[in-house]
Image: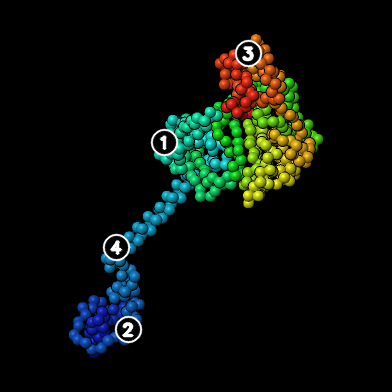
Amino acid sequence: MKNAFFFWSFKYKHKLFLVNQMVLADWFGTTPKGDKSPDPPVVEGIIEEPSTKELSLYNYNHPHEKPEKDNQLSLQGIVTSNPYFAAGGGLMVLGAGLGLARKGLIAFSNLMIRRLIVDLEIRNSDKSYDWFLNWMANYKHRVSRQLSVQTKYVQHQNGSIQTGFSFVPGPGSHWFKYNGAWFNVKRERSERIHNSGQPMETVTLKTLYKDRFLLASILDEARQMAMKMNEGKTVLFKSWGQDWRVFGKPRRKRVIDSVILDKGIKESIIDDVKEFLESGSWYNDRGIPYRRGYLLYGPPGSGKTSFIQALAGEFDYNIAIMNIGEPNLTDDRLAYLMNNIPERTILLLEDIDAAFNRREQSKEQGYSSGVTFSGLLNALDGVASAEEVITFMTTNHPEKLDPALLRPGRIDVKVLIDNASDYQIEKMFQRFYDNEEKLDKFMKKFKDLELPYVSTAQLQGLFVQFKEDPDLAIENVEILKSPHMNNFFYE
């Protein structure tokens, strides 16, 4: 029985096998002594399955040989054995990789933009906004595909109309080259509305960080261009919402000698304004509000507004015109505007007596003016009043003004600008014709008319009508007796 062997049967991969003891011993790692090379297993039939203990022993001795069925049921087996799963997984991995690469590229480009690009934002509430647009509209080395039109409309005193068009960069992206550096300009218009009623706009300039110093050069060049356009001219401002906006085209400065007032009046006002402008430290040292108010009163056509315009040109000032009777003007808005007057600007309140008369009339019609009399007084001389301001008021009826408005601090200087005196008539004739001999003839004929008064506007109308020939002016001096025949009524 030494060489007798017993046969065992077991099931493997859905098949039943019968092996002798020698082979099974080799599988389980126990080979009988004396037999070093067992014969191959002999399968003779199905007898019985091996026990659980015998299969566990086999799996322990062969750990790397996993059943093919388990391998097919695993995730790795499914992916590797199924071509559809293999292709989808590759696309998924590729898409994830590309997505990460895209995010990395965007992050890197944003980093480079922050490090290498500098941008400058200009809002339309800033003065340099219009300066830059005007500069870029006249700059030759630019590339613009979006344009906006600006129409210049001028109506002359004789009724003729002059128009002009200019194209400025519109909302969108633009490029220009300046001193060898490229600049990108992006003009954007917001849906938000500014206090002035206009949509809010911004202009953003972008360039390389190394060329950032050119931004200041561009703005300085734009400022100089704007100043050159206004050189020798007086800029008029009018209130628009809560802002001051340029009204019309800048006007040529009026020479102070072109306005002829009665003897000594013009010189006294000029000296007073000059002294005020030179006394800023004196006011500050004594704690006195640094402001000055003037009231020019007199009949219509006496030259009140013309003198203010000439005075602004004399001191290189601009003029801000305020209409107190405007229906939409309120006390708060009035105080805000008077505290934000452009620099080197005279505040002009014309026909101050009529402002509150119009308010009473408008109430009868169902409307009301927002400015109260106390609001005007507080804006002129109150806690919220502005400093470093020169205010001129005009009126044809000073008797209608409230005494509270006439007190010092609100109105410091009152000057009568009356109808033309003999001194003014002589000076005006000499300025137009420069002829002493003809002057005597004109004055004699004028006095023969025995007119109670004549305004400087009437005289100027006569001289302009016959500007080429003083004899014709002398012959037609009787026109002054019929003011309606004179077509030149203006101050």
Please give the label number shown on residue 6: none
- Lower sequence index among marks 4 and 3: 4
**Residue 187 located left or right of residue 235:** left
Quarter occupied by the C terminus: top right
Judged from the image, the secondary structure of the residue bearing numbered disc 1 is strand
> What residue is shown with label 3?
434
Which callout, 4 or 2, points to the residue nearer the camera?
A: 4
Please give the label number shown on residue 143: 1
> What residue is shown with label 2?
54
Per the model, the C-alpha gap separating discs 4 and 2 is: 42 Å
- In this view, the residue in front, 467 or 134, is 467
- In this view, the residue in front, 453 or 13, is 453
Disc 3 marks a residue whose amino acid type is Asp
Residue pictured at 23% horizontal, 87% vertical: 7
Q: Quick check: marks 4 and 3 in contact, CB under 8 Å?
A: no
Up/down of 472 relative to 397, above or below: above
Disc 4 marks a residue whose amino acid type is Ala
Per the model, the C-alpha gap separating discs 4 and 3 is: 104 Å
Judged from the image, the secondary structure of the residue bearing numbered disc 2 is helix
- In this view, the residue in front, 352 or 101, is 352
Residue pictured at 57% horizontal, 30% vertical: 250
Per the model, the C-alpha gap separating discs 1 and 2 is: 89 Å
Judged from the image, the secondary structure of the residue bearing numbered disc 4 is helix
> Can residue 438 be seen by looking at this rendering?
yes
